[in-house]
Image (tube, grey):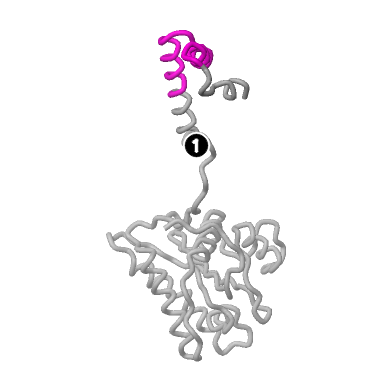
Amino acid sequence: MTIVAGIGHSMDCEVRKEVVIALFGKSDSSRRRYDLDMRYLLLILFFLPTIGVATSAPVIRCVPSGDEVIAGVDLKEVRRVWLSWTNAERKVVGLKPLVQNAQLDRSATTWSRFSQGRGVMSHQRPGQTTYYDYPLITKWFADLGLTFKNVNRMTYSESIGYGSYSCTVNDCTQTLITALRSTFDYYLKEKKRSSRPHYGAIINAQFQIQGMGVAIDSKTKRYYVTTHYATAISSRPTPVCP
């Protein structure tokens, strides 16, 4: 402050020269070094935010779908057909169609692939003793970031199935669809039964979304299919990568 206050109109040229030298150095070479240092400093300050982003941990913007690559199969078409079967049944009883949901596709695929890995298709999660342990399955969904809206005491349902599958041609999409139809037809056979958990999920008026996942065991030539139905997702899970 004293230097700034001392620089006034009353100062003669020699005094001003001394002040300038005190501020910027005693020679032209000193001033050039000062200017160069300032340029380096400005460059560092300019690129510092970029450097910070580059060295920080990457931000997870989406999670993998987990879909298995099945040779010669268009999984998108398989899911479209499976959903069309479901909505055809809902239309018969006057219900609105379900909407395919990527989060439920992922959860269904996760369970199908797990089941294929252990060679058993079941609702039983690791550590589960009863066949359909709702609290434990709910926790399993929560671990995937999924919780569901409770509508008239309904939240979600899981239907599973397995069957034979083998294909040696280039386009196996229709072959898999035909094989999967046997599981869907099994669900439809429950129509006239007093206990109809699979068919009941298909025509549940509270459900709005559906996801389907399939895994193939090439050694045993068997498919494992899971369908997840739900009211609505109440949590905010990380989006599934396209």
35 relative to 242, above or below: above
Residue assigned mark 1: 49
Q: Which amino acid does label 1 sit on?
A: Pro
111 relative to 4, above or below: below
Please tell me which residue is depicted at 42% across the width and 19% down the height of the picture: 36
87 or 1: nearer the viewer: 1
Q: Where is residue 157 in the image (x, y as percent from the top left)?
A: 60, 73
Find the residue positioned furthest to the left. 170
Please tell me which residue is depicted at 71% across the width and 66% down the height of the picture: 135
Question: Mostly what secondary structure, the magenta segment?
Answer: helix
Find the residue positioned furthest to the front. 10
- Segment colored magenta: 12-39
Q: In this view, does 205 lie to the left or right of 241?
A: right
90 relative to 108, above or below: below
Q: Where is residue 160 in the image (x, y as percent from the top left)?
A: 54, 69
Provide the secondary structure element on which disc 1 rests: helix
Does the magenta segment cover residue 2?
Answer: no
Q: Position of residue 18 (x, y in %)?
A: 51, 11
58 or 70: nearer the viewer: 58
